[in-house]
Image: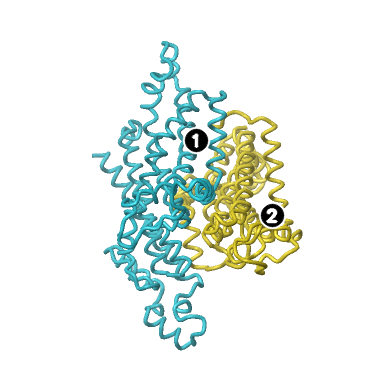
């Protein structure tokens, strides 16, 4: 699938970049000195000593908003990845071990969810739960789930037919013991690789959700929404669009490179 | 005969998925607490006002009853009336759909040939430098969300160089193709992501095919370069390619919401985003249903073409 291993230097740079953006996003609200929501000057004012990145569409300090705007995107993507990963692993192992018929039913249900464009799921849920981050979390989880279930089910099936599972079953081990001692250790690598790929997709979706104004609404700062809020003033002060956009680009690209490497290392082992 | 049966089964499958999805869309928008009467009546309305409004809208009937009424009407082409501006949902859809399709077709026209070329170039040199460069570039491009690609394009080509408009304003009653300049950036933004995703899929299937015994045999006979690519690899990649195109199109339906919103382009995606922002429930339901239907139709067509082209599937039934 993938074009060989990437050079260690690329991976180190990607790892460093992803960590740096994550640190900014997570500790930003603690580091910020100004308020992210209070107007401090004219709209789209250019950078000055007091406001190093200038002001945004309604005269708020861009630096403070940048420092406050990353946490939601990161926590939502991590939360959705975690819940989809756990649910997906549980369902995937169940479906993989169950008889063909029960397994097929799970796959059918999963297929129905998988045909819907991801953003459509988010938009419909956001219409039902307006202004709620929970809608974004649930939406991204729901969108990620089919992929996890499919991959884990396939991995479980290939382990389940191997000799040692049959031996364990013949020995009279309970189903749970088989899962714990024989299945889980052998699908763990696949689950891990899958989680990396899912996380990068989740970051992509959560940022886009912010851009579309889904989730907790104004005046809260959000990197994705900063792009849409300030796009109109691009020619006056480009920083309120450019800084959050660059942070998101660096983070999504770095996470993707790392996830791809993880998939090569573990997925085909 | 068996082929007809196989296709009939796929169509029936798609219809049943559509029924399930329509129920899910309806449930998500009606059961979840975004109460339409509260929105319409405004923040300072009394409980009595809201109750009367609920009655007028038919919201006091049972959920199953409301779903059946809605779904039956939808099956006859009546998607109801939006809360905002009392616009007929089906009419809005009919007006916006050509604009969205135009954008999607333009993006595909750029992305498909480019993706095939890049995927072939990378896949035929599996593991070598060209491959590594193309694979890394497409991985990075596919990683970046569409709205950021679009924002960067606007910053450079509209704000910076002033070559094309920043937003795609189309006068009421006019059509975007009457002012082609407004199409350039939205189509380009859609094409970048679609191209990157598709090039990766093409590369993967080319790598598969290039290691197949018949390609190895052609290589041993001394067939190389363009001839090998066009005569031996490409024809066998038609099946996977159909799937690439359908996956691309499904991706464009989501991407269109983002790109149309950023450029204020009058398409279905833009209307859907506005409807969600305004909590216009009938509009959200109708447009979401239309997008699901479009996706299913595209996947179904891809599936049918795949069945027709694939001797294995043809024979098995």
User: Is residue B62 or residue B242 the one in the foreground?
Assistant: B242
Q: Is residue A59 above or below residue B247?
A: below
Q: Is residue A38 above or below residue B47?
A: above
In this rendering, does residue A105 appear at all?
A: no
Question: What is the quadrant of residue B289 in the picture?
Answer: bottom left
In this rendering, does residue B27 appear at all?
A: yes
> Chain A shown in which color?
yellow
Badges 2 and 1, same chain: no
Q: CA distance from mark 2 to mark 1?
A: 30 Å
User: Is residue B122 or residue B53 the one in the foreground?
Assistant: B122
Work out which quarter of the rendered image holds the C terminus of chain A and state it. Answer: top right
Viewed as shown, does residue B88 lie left or right of B205?
Answer: left
Residue that label 1 marks = B200
**Secondary structure state at the residue bearing disc 1:** helix
Residue that label 2 marks = A25
Look at 61% across and 61% down and name the residue there: A56
The chain letter of the cyan chain reads B
Q: Is residue B238 above or below residue A105?
A: above
Indicate the chain on which mark 1 is placed: B
């Amino acid at each position: 699938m993938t074009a060989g291993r990437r050079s260690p230097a690329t991976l180190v740079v990607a790892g460093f970049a992803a960590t740096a953006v994550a640190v900014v996003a997570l500790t930003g609200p603690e580091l910020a000195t100004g308020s992210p929501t209070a107007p401090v000057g004219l709209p789209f004012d250019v950078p000055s000593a007091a406001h190093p990145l200038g002001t945004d569409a309604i005269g708020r300090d861009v630096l403070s908003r940048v420092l406050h705007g990353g946490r939601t995107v990161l926590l939502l993507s991590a939360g959705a990845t975690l819940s989809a990963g756990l649910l997906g692993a549980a369902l995937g192992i169940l479906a993989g071990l169950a008889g063909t018929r029960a397994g097929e039913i799970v796959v059918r249900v999963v297929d129905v969810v998988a045909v819907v464009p991801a953003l459509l799921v988010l938009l419909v849920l956001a219409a039902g739960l307006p202004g709620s981050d929970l809608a974004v979390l649930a939406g991204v989880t729901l969108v990620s789930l089919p992929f996890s279930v499919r991959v884990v089910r396939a991995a479980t099936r290939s382990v389940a037919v191997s000799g040692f599972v049959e031996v364990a079953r013949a020995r009279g081990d309970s189903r749970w013991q088989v899962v714990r001692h024989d299945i889980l250790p052998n699908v763990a690598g696949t689950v891990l690789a899958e989680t990396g790929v899912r996380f990068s997709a989740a970051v992509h979706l959560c940022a886009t959700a912010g851009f579309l104004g889904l989730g907790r609404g104004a005046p809260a700062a959000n990197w994705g929404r900063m792009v849409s809020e300030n796009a109109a003033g691009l020619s006056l002060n480009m920083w309120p669009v450019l800084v959050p956009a660059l942070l998101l680009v660096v983070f999504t690209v770095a996470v993707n490179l790392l996830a791809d490497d993880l998939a090569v290392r573990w997925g085909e082992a | 005969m068996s082929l007809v049966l196989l296709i009939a089964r796929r169509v029936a499958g798609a219809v049943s998925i559509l029924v399930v999805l329509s129920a899910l869309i309806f449930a998500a928008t009606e059961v979840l607490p975004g109460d339409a009467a509260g929105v319409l009546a405004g923040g300072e309305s009394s409980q009595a006002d809201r109750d009367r409004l609920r009655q007028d809208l038919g919201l006091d009937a049972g959920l199953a009853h409301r779903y059946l009424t809605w779904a039956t009407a939808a099956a006859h082409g009546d998607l109801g009336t939006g809360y905002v501006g009392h616009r007929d949902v089906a009419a809005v859809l009919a007006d916006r759909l050509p604009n969205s399709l135009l954008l999607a077709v333009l993006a595909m026209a750029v992305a498909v040939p480019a993706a095939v070329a890049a995927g072939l170039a990378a896949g035929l040199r599996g593991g070598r430098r060209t491959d590594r460069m193309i694979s890394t570039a497409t991985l990075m491009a596919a990683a970046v969300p569409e709205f950021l690609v679009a924002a960067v394009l606007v910053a450079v080509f509209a704000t910076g160089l002033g070559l094309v408009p920043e937003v795609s304003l189309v006068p009421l009653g006019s059509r975007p193709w009457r002012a082609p300049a407004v199409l350039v950036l939205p189509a380009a933004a859609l094409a970048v992501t679609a191209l990157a995703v598709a090039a990766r899929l093409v590369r993967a299937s080319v790598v598969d095919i290039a290691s197949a015994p018949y390609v190895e045999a052609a290589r041993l006979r001394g067939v190389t370069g363009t001839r090998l690519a066009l005569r031996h690899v490409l024809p066998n990649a038609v099946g996977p390619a159909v799937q690439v195109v359908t996956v691309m199109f499904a991706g464009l339906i989501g991407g269109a919401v983002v790109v149309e919103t950023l450029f204020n382009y009058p398409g279905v995606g833009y209307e859907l985003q506005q409807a969600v922002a305004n909590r216009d429930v009938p509009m959200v339901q109708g447009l979401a249903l239309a997008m699901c239907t479009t996706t299913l139709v595209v996947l179904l067509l891809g599936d049918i073409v795949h069945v027709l082209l694939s001797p294995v599937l043809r024979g098995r039934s």
